[in-house]
Amino acid sequence: MTRDCSRRGPLESITSTESPASSTELPSAVASVSLLVGGIGIMNVMLVSVSERTREIGMLGAMGLKPSQISLLFVLEGIMIGLVGVAAGIVVGLALNGILMQVGLDFGSVTQAASYMALIKDKVYPTWGTEKLLMRASTVLIICALASLLPAIEAGRREPAAALHFV
């Protein structure tokens, strides 16, 4: 009697070394949505900044700055906002991760409630996870630069004379 290897029992599917595609799709979807929300937030802050600083933009244009130079100022401002966010995120994230490395995440009540999670011990201890830190920081900075492009173009299009009359 031969055993059909294509059929798996419930425990065999859990202990398998194959990783389902959904285990990477959900974190990627959450990260994509959070990056989109962050980009929209940066764009909103920059649009408000452009509308609040209309007179300043007019003064810069009257002093001889080209529209591309005014736009560059606002793109650099968006990148600086992103740098502050990245730095704060790294500090807070690594601090929380350091605490969780010592304390651990308690899954004891969850594993007792569901017998199919028998492979998870009572406490799970994370690692630092700094392998992709530079890539993630540069992704955030690129998104900040792209999100500040529209407000920067809007700032560069302002006419100096009309902007100076703005109250």
Image: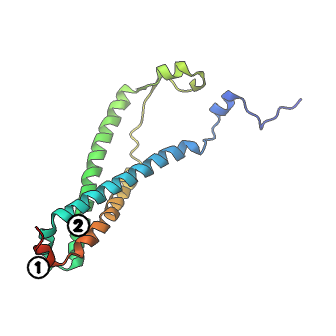
Q: Which residue does the image show at 73% across and 33% down from the upper left?
A: 8
> In the current view of this chain or complex, which residue is farthest to the right?
1
Q: Describe residue 127's horizontal placement relative to residue 5 as left or right.
A: left
Q: Nearer the viewer, mark 2 or mark 1?
A: 1
In the image, which disc is placed on residue 32? none
User: In the rendered image, which quarter is residue 50 located in?
Assistant: bottom left
Q: Residue 62, labelled with which disc?
A: 1
Q: Residue at x 13, y 81 (%)?
A: 64
Residue drawn at the location 26% of the way across and 71% of the way down? 154
Q: Quadrant of the C terminus?
A: bottom left
Residue 116 placement, left or right of 67: right
Secondary-structure class at tag 2:
helix
Q: Can see residue 156?
A: yes
Residue 61 appears in the rendering:
no
The disc labelled 2 sits on which kind of residue?
A: Phe
Which quarter of the figure has residue 11?
Answer: top right
Q: Nearer the viewer, residue 121 or 81?
A: 81
What is the number of the mark on residue 74? 2
Three-letter amino acid code at disc 1?
Answer: Ala
Q: Does 135 appear above or below 30?
A: below
Q: Residue at x 34, y 64 (%)?
A: 146
Q: Nearer the viewer, residue 133 or 113?
A: 113
Give the percent coordinates (x, y) of residue 121: 51, 24
Q: Report how far apart the C-alphas of labels 2 and 1 lie in the structure.
A: 17 Å
Residue 14 lies, in percent from the top left, at 63, 32
Label 1 CA crowd tier, 10 Å (few <14, some 14–19, many 20+): some
Label located before the other in sequence (2 or 1): 1
Q: Position of residue 66 (x, y in %)?
A: 19, 80
